[in-house]
Image (cartoon, grey):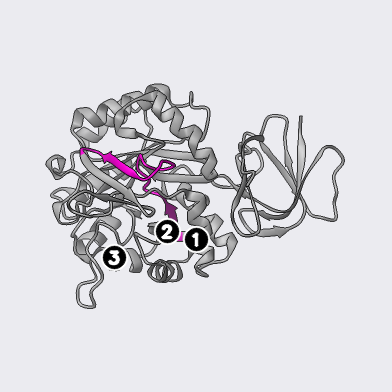
Amino acid sequence: MSYYIHAAKFFLPSNTENGGYLEITDEGKFGQYLPESQKPTGKIEEMNGQWIAPGLVDTHIHGLLGHDVMDNDWEAIKTMSEGLLKAGVTSWLPTTLTGSFDQLNAVCKTIGDHAGQETGAKIQGIYFEGPYFTTEHKGAQNPKYFKNPSFSEYQQWQASAKGLLRKIAIAPERHGAVEFTRAVTADGTVVALGHSDATFEQAQACIEAGASVFTHTFNGMSGLNHRAPGMVGAAMYLNRVDDELICDGHHVRPEVATILIKEKGPEHIALITDCMRAGMMPDGDYVLGEFPVYVKDGMARLKGGNNLAGSVLKLNEAIKNVVDWNGVAPQDAVEMGSYVPAKSSGVGEKCGSILPGRAADYIVLNDDMSLAATYLDGQERYRNDH
């Protein structure tokens, strides 16, 4: 049965509206938005004092609830998709780590064969974080799998994924990176740049060849020096590129995150979690890829090396954090957690915005940016009763 939502605020694509009514159709899709002065007839769901935003889109997430995409277990991926609803996430890109060709191919096959059968957050594609990286900024990636990019490998993975490989991250200084970028982006897949010690010029060469995203900006890349701008300088300076950003307060200091948001504008910042399997789990010992990790005080770190190893961040916390840090207005935070990640991963025509005819995947926020509820296809799937 169709209904209208009556709420205090609606985060629409072109504007944030105070009050009004948003139609949810019988088919579970968004209908029209009506201003406060045009009260519709029909069923009205009252969400007094609350805000309606598009469902969040997590485009860089490795694991959750004790599971990891690299486990190559469809049941585990289904569990992750259900769990993501508790973080306000209604669409996501299961994200791989560096691995062997065959390991990655197996993950492509599993997701390619089953995508669409998940019952929680919708799989909109696969994100390959690697394996075409360099060792200087390896982070928690395993350098034994690092190599130069190969378009023929990409084509085999894409065939196994049935076209679902949406984005792949590479290091611009790798031999053949520019040619690879040109070929992959011509094939319709997004190329991101990360885990790299590239110079500004090497990064720019890949951007000019079609790369359009920087992977978890500041983390795993050559820093900004006044005489050597590096990857960070390229991420800040170059036009028409989007920058992923982990806003848990640990990966990037709030002040530095805010500098990047001011420099690029919210329309070019994609909030991500980079969450690993300990997300929504208690502190303790875990594994990321083939490395032992310990989780404590909201941080996941490699044992022995102490490097940060992904995060345990939830995307609803990230959009709240950037507002709490006084970095942006609520509508900017929502844009950075929904529209920008979707657009920057090549799935913006499917998710990330409240538009007529789109699946009614939306979240209800309280006025302190905390998550109240998550809806999928117009149906309530999660409610936070606290």
**Amino acid type of the residue that numbered disc 2 sits on in the rendered structure:** Cys
Q: Which residue is mark 2?
A: 247
Circles 1 and 2, Cβ within 8 Å, touching? The answer is: yes
Residue 326 pos. (x, y %): 52, 70
280 is within the stretch colored magenta: yes
For label 3, the crowd category at 10 Å Cα-Cα, with few meaning under 14, some 14 to 19 and many 20 or more, is many
What residue would you read off at disc 3? 232
Q: Amino acid at mark 1?
A: Asn
Q: Earlier in the sequence, mark 1 or mark 3?
A: 3
Q: Residues within 10 Å of mark 1 (few under 14, many from 20)?
A: many
The range drawn in magenta is 268-290
Considering only order in the chain, which callout, 2 or 1, is on the residue closer to the N terminus? 2
N-terminal label among 2 and 3: 3
Q: Is 280 left, or right, of 203 in this rendering?
A: right
Disc on res. 321 = 1
- Which of label 1 and label 3 is nearer to you? 1
* Rendering coords of residue 45 (x, y %): 77, 42
